[in-house]
Amino acid sequence: MIPPLEEGVIRVIPLGGVEEIGRNMTVIEYGNDIVIADIGFQFSNENTPGVDYILPNTKYLEERKHKIRAIAITHGHLDHIGGIPYLIERLGNPPIYTREMGALLIKKRQTEFPHLPPLDIRTIDADDKAIPLSPTMKLRFFGVTHSIPDSTGIIVETPHGDIVITGDVRIENEGGIPVDKETEQYKMFRDRNILLFSMDSTGAEQPGFSPSEKTILKNIDQIVANAPGRMILATFATQVERLIEFFNIAKRYNRKVVIEGRSMKNNVEIIKHLNLVDTSHIIQLEEIAKYPPNQILMIATGAQGEEFAALMRMSNSTHKFIKLQRSDTILLSSSIIPGNEMAVQKLKDNLYRHDCKIITVLDSNVHTSGHGKRGEIEWLHKQIPYRFFMPIHGHHYMLKMHAELARNIGCAPENIIVPDNGSIIEIQDRGTKLVRLKEKAPCEDIAVEGLNIGPISEVVIRDRKMLAEDGIFVVMALVNTRTGRLKKSPDIIARGFVYLRESQELLSEARNIIKNSIESVTVGSHPINFDYARNAVTEDVSRFLFQKTAKAPIVIPVIIGV
Amino acid sequence: MIPPLEEGVIRVIPLGGVEEIGRNMTVIEYGNDIVIADIGFQFSNENTPGVDYILPNTKYLEERKHKIRAIAITHGHLDHIGGIPYLIERLGNPPIYTREMGALLIKKRQTEFPHLPPLDIRTIDADDKAIPLSPTMKLRFFGVTHSIPDSTGIIVETPHGDIVITGDVRIENEGGIPVDKETEQYKMFRDRNILLFSMDSTGAEQPGFSPSEKTILKNIDQIVANAPGRMILATFATQVERLIEFFNIAKRYNRKVVIEGRSMKNNVEIIKHLNLVDTSHIIQLEEIAKYPPNQILMIATGAQGEEFAALMRMSNSTHKFIKLQRSDTILLSSSIIPGNEMAVQKLKDNLYRHDCKIITVLDSNVHTSGHGKRGEIEWLHKQIPYRFFMPIHGHHYMLKMHAELARNIGCAPENIIVPDNGSIIEIQDRGTKLVRLKEKAPCEDIAVEGLNIGPISEVVIRDRKMLAEDGIFVVMALVNTRTGRLKKSPDIIARGFVYLRESQELLSEARNIIKNSIESVTVGSHPINFDYARNAVTEDVSRFLFQKTAKAPIVIPVIIGV
């Protein structure tokens, strides 16, 4: 039972994103008002087979939805906006405050959910004045550098001071010296009363400063300049700032631009709409043959080895229009997202079958993350004069490393809390005391699975993992209820177990076992105890199969009395 | 149809290890003689659920087993010896030539297969003279540096020159300058007639030189020196050379050594047996409490996040004896093997819950690979005056990069072949011509799966993947063969699909669909066409389930006439 919020107390609850990368969502509650920072989702992984996405648990908010004044979006990446279509109705359709790029990405995504009521999106500028949400709460945005335009941090103003959330952030720098724009960006904090500072921890494990995006782009520029034939640039579609620069580079070297991949096309549409760069040199894929190879620059998805993405199709020669050739230069301007290593190896294997030139981050500085490393994190801490600190965005160990960094530069240990999903953090005593309640907000994982949205069923996931390893073995027998004898030889259906065509002997032995096992229970018993027969045959067949194959399929007995 | 081997022609066939990391096995054939270099296996991965190991295909050898004179083992790692128990009988139990460490590891492993006939192991020294295998073939070993003692390369001497295979190899160096021992090791090649040079490509993607093992050990030494409490060193059990040094470090700082993890214990037994280091300060796990924490150094498995390894059990507080405490220092002296990233993240998350000190390669140089990077590879090429070059050991793209490196330092393109598994490479015309036959040796993947060894069944693997995503939906109906009507409401068994307890409405609708679908075929038809009924219900139920859930379980219809 979560205690009611006391007067004068500020509550901060990360509902997601603090035990994983993804599904970022943080609640700020004061008096009668709640602001939500971001509604992200997380992609499924090897531990959740069959699941599409994982959402934060919003039960705490659903019970308090009358208090929700605003959803504040830091930027338009799916780990910050992906949960909106699945969760917005449960939250009572509150207004969504976002800058323009985020607004467009949210709207674009929403078109895939035509049954939902229209969103109440309120587009703001980063340098806007504070937005009053109630007599005691204001919302304010500030610009930060990330990998997509219009990235912002959030300030929630309360009578006791500010709650500051950076969103995803890196610091553009030259050899470890932040550029002037960065210093400017954070000047405003010098005179503010910052109660709680909360920051992205994704890069907390990496020492030093990232290479600057400027360096990356200079290197890519040179690679394009020297490419003898077609240039294929593969990167995350989410790297929108880089995508914009690719257009400039193409122009510089008199190359037409071809866009391949749905997410890339979507983002280019938005870039066009916002007039962020000259895109007049885009051509259609079908026009590619009209130009000599050295006048083509293709921007493609698939650098993570996604099975059906443009680059993978080119690599395995199933792309309709593009046949890779020796003079092509392919640049993977990306890092590998943990979990995608095997897919990227496969992609590289396929690409290298074509003898074209392939360049990755191992060869040259051609990618930098949107998340600051330790040097950047430390620098940013020093720009913000805060009292309390709560690391967010990352696995637990990343948050712990971030907390250690804060301690090392002078933050008192009692002023730092490393939260879990659902941790209820309170700032009590008029902003002087940081406390973690022993109670937690509901935090069970919520899965999107096909059309269903709900708690992840451990039973179903466990079955899937067992099925994936050893398959299923269904046994069917018709029992004469009068004699207790099988009417005919039992049937067997197996999937994912062993290759049955090559296992006739095993099947024939199994049929004997099944017959004997069932009849040992059913012959001469009136009435027949079918449950008992099912248990007996399951046990006997499982043991037999394990002895013969060392595999343990799920055995399902179907025994029917006739 | 593979053409017969012509007189004077040398055939080299990599049966495994050239399209993957693992299952290394290369055939050298001349006249009436065959030598096999290594018999490794590969660990299963996400693309082969339910498979234990993947073996090279040895059909080519099985058809020529009377010619096999020797199996030459380069070192005792499983990707070089792991296939022996599964394949040795098929090859006619030929003699295995190996140095002592390899011999002990092979014998240790063989004890797990007590039904197999004894192996014919012939232990040799690296500096032994050539071993005559036949009038026209000799076998010779040479010492190389890797991460396990007794690592060797192999020379197969033929009348036309040498076939040289390095095995896994790195070059110990100081800041990119190879140490004297390395130069010594390869001096012997200056005066030899080397026809074909074949070398490990695992590190071909990484630029520069690896940090030296000496540097690594110095860093680890300092970490141990400064650890305020217990020191827990986690590394690959296969890093035997490092393991040996851990004993010296422990002695230096007056720490008792505790060994945790089966593979680590096995390797320590072998170290003891070979008297490679003073192990008198080993204590049993149960004795740990007798010593102050700063006199304990534990060496543990589990740095890859293996679910039941010692370190994982400590991290999730299920270890029987070790409870982690704040003063513990845990060093992960390892890199992450591709595919293990998620498991290692989980491990780190668990470890950081304990507030102990954790150090990884990101914090300090505490691990170096046993496989040389590009700088080392290039240096080694320059020590060996060869005519032809064939990269082995690695994914295709690694081999291609290795081939490019060889070209860049002067090897003519026509003197390089990048093989696939089963490629038949011939050196023809008295050692002057390198040719890849258009025919291939059989190269279908062979899987160890439970007790079965055989070709991987694509059907079974595909079923497993489908089961893992969407589960199975078994439909059972009893049909009155006279009326064609169902005797009772159909039964449904589902696993891994959706959580059935929460899907009663779905099930009830499904039962209606099943009844209608079957009866639309069976009512009034004599005799009943059961195949047609099964197809109809499968189609109708699949469509219904997909409409309702957007999931596509495997639907299995069981329709029984009574």
Image (spheres, coloured by chain):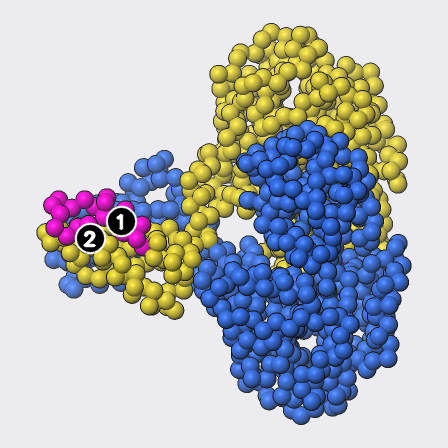
Chain colours: A yellow, B blue
Mark 1 or mark 2: name the one nearer the start of the chain: 2
Residue that mark 1 sits on: A536
The answer to whether A302 appears left or right of B448 in the picture is right
Q: Is residue B543 visible?
A: no
Where is residue B459 shown, x and y percent of the image? 44, 63
Q: Residue furthest left?
A: A482
Where is residue A9 shown, x and y percent of the image? 63, 11
Q: Residue furthest front?
A: B280
At mark 2, the secondary structure is: helix
Which residue type carries mark 2?
Answer: Ser
Residue that mark 2 sits on: A520
The answer to whether A398 appears left or right of A440 in the picture is right
Where is residue B264 shown, x and y percent of the image? 63, 50
Q: Residue furthest bottom?
A: B7
At mark 1, the secondary structure is: helix
Q: Observer-nearest residue: A437 or B219?
A: B219
Residue A477: which quarter of the image? bottom left
**x 70%, y 47%: residue:** B280
Q: Chain of mark 2?
A: A
Q: Observer-nearest residue: B315 or B536?
A: B315
Which residue type carries mark 1?
Answer: Ala
Q: Is residue B359 above or below residue B27?
A: above
**x 76%, y 52%: residue:** B368
Tell me where the magenta segment starts and ends, as one range. A521-541
The answer for how far apart the CA atoms under marks 1 and 2 are is 9 Å
Mark number, residue A365? none
Where is residue A275 shown, x and y percent of the image? 74, 41
The answer to whether A196 appears left or right of A53 in the picture is right
Tell me if mark 1 has few (under 14), some (14-19) or many (20+) residues whose alpha carbon lies within 10 angstroms of its own. some
Q: Observer-nearest residue: B400 or A215?
A: B400
Asked whether the residues under marks 1 and 2 belong to the same chain, the reply is yes
